[in-house]
Amino acid sequence: MLPQRIIATKRDSKALAQADIEAFVAGITDGRVGDEQLGAFAMAVFINGMNPDERVALTRAMRDSGRVLQWPDLGGPVLDKHSTGGVGDAVSLILGPWVAACGGYVPMISGHGLGHTGGTLDKLAAIPGYDPFPDFEALSRIVRRTGVAIVGQTDELAPADRRFYAVRDVTATVECIPLIVASILSKKLAEGLDALVLDVKTGSGSVMGDLAQCIELAEVLCDTASEAGTATSALITDMDQVLARSAGNALEVIECIEILNGQRTDGRMLAITRELAVEMLLAGRLCQTRDAAERRLDTALANGEAAERFAQMVRAMGGPSDLLDRPASHFPDAPVMIEAAPANAGLVGEIDVRAVGMAVVELGGGRHRAGDRIDSRVGFSDIAGIGERVDAHRPLARVHARTDEDAERAAESLRRAFALSEAADCPEPVRHRVHADTSEHGEPAA
């Protein structure tokens, strides 16, 4: 296998043979393909695309680069969700335990942040002692006992994607449908799922942005997963404003704990998490109707079952046993906290959510390069949403920073990212739904 020949083929807009794709992915896994070659390949695909056969071959080769999990005699459906990434998107930390409390099993493989978007793995790293890299035997044991384990990619599970993921982050090749599809599905299909639900973000804080592109991505994802025999549906959800009220790793974990503990009972993150959870219960045939799924979920959240599953998972992964009871004792404050007041009073009309995400990165809450260390303390809390009035008494957000200079710079970035107006329409959280044709694999639950 000569990597430069394969790179040149795609550079010249020619289709790659399945054998070439498999050989290149094998080279990613065993190190014969260098990072510079991987970056060149990613750029060639970004510019010239892939046809459906190439896309499926890349996905399968990356899935098969490591171990594919099996779950015999589990007693319930194996389910998962994946988000294409946004700002303030900590849905997974609530969703996995919530679905587990309703009878599903969720072995969720998560990743680091890409570009301006936050990563679930980075949020988990804010929890003291949480080890997201158990061996397979430990992962299997935790999933069977607690119903959920949110982990990172290991050398056993889709190792080719682990390298590819890091290189895409620093080579401006994140927004590429074939690479997004292969990255998402190689990890998810390696989990041995019965069904998968996708959260494809649209809007200024999303990877893809345009709604039409997001629908295209969702359809391609669903079709490709269906080719592999996994029933898959997708929600297109809004990212024209920060999903949670916070952005920054520890701050988002704290917000999730408040939702699980019943201290926050509304908001866009909870609404979207509930919609995704309904889709997962229906796809796993744990409920037969949407109303039944909603009732089951609401009960599991209100009676503390979802919170207890989260607590069990954190303990099993090495985290503190009292995280839900004493969260403040486990998350130190940032050294500097200031209010980011708007330049003028008004209603929030538009938000450049990508700019908000990059402001978190500039504070130290994300990466400029693979391997950069993240400060989990920094970010924004109490972020204003579209349609909300802001003024000297209600700031755009509270800034959590390492230095006074960082805090002032971040506050100015927020003022530039928020456009105020006299009137504002808040977009619907769920914009579109996509279901793949699963006729060969059984109809999805109604």
Image (cartoon, rainbow, N blue to C red):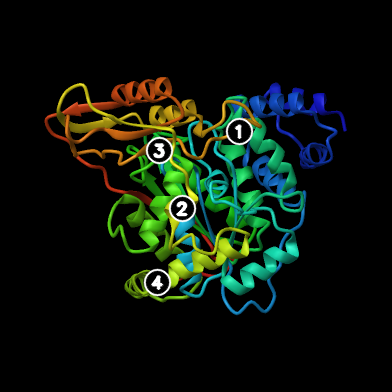
The answer to whether residue 269 is left or right of residue 50 is left
Mark 1 and mark 3: Cα distance apart in space: 35 Å
Could you tell which of marks 2 and 4 lies nearer the N-terminus?
Answer: 4
Mark 1 lies on residue: 373
Residue 226: image quadrant is bottom right
Mark 2 and mark 3: Cα distance apart in space: 45 Å
Could you tell which of marks 1 and 3 lies nearer the N-terminus?
Answer: 3
Residue 412: image quadrant is top left
Give the percent coordinates (x, y) of residue 263.
Answer: 31, 60
* Camera-nearest label, 1 or 3: 1
Mark 3 lies on residue: 212
Q: Residue at x 42, y 44 (%)?
A: 251
Q: Is residue 301 above or below residue 111?
A: below
The answer to whether residue 74 is left or right of residue 271 is right
Q: Residue at x 62, y 65 (%)?
A: 316
What kind of residue is marked 4?
A: Gly
Give the percent coordinates (x, y) of residue 228.
Answer: 65, 57
Mark 2 lies on residue: 329
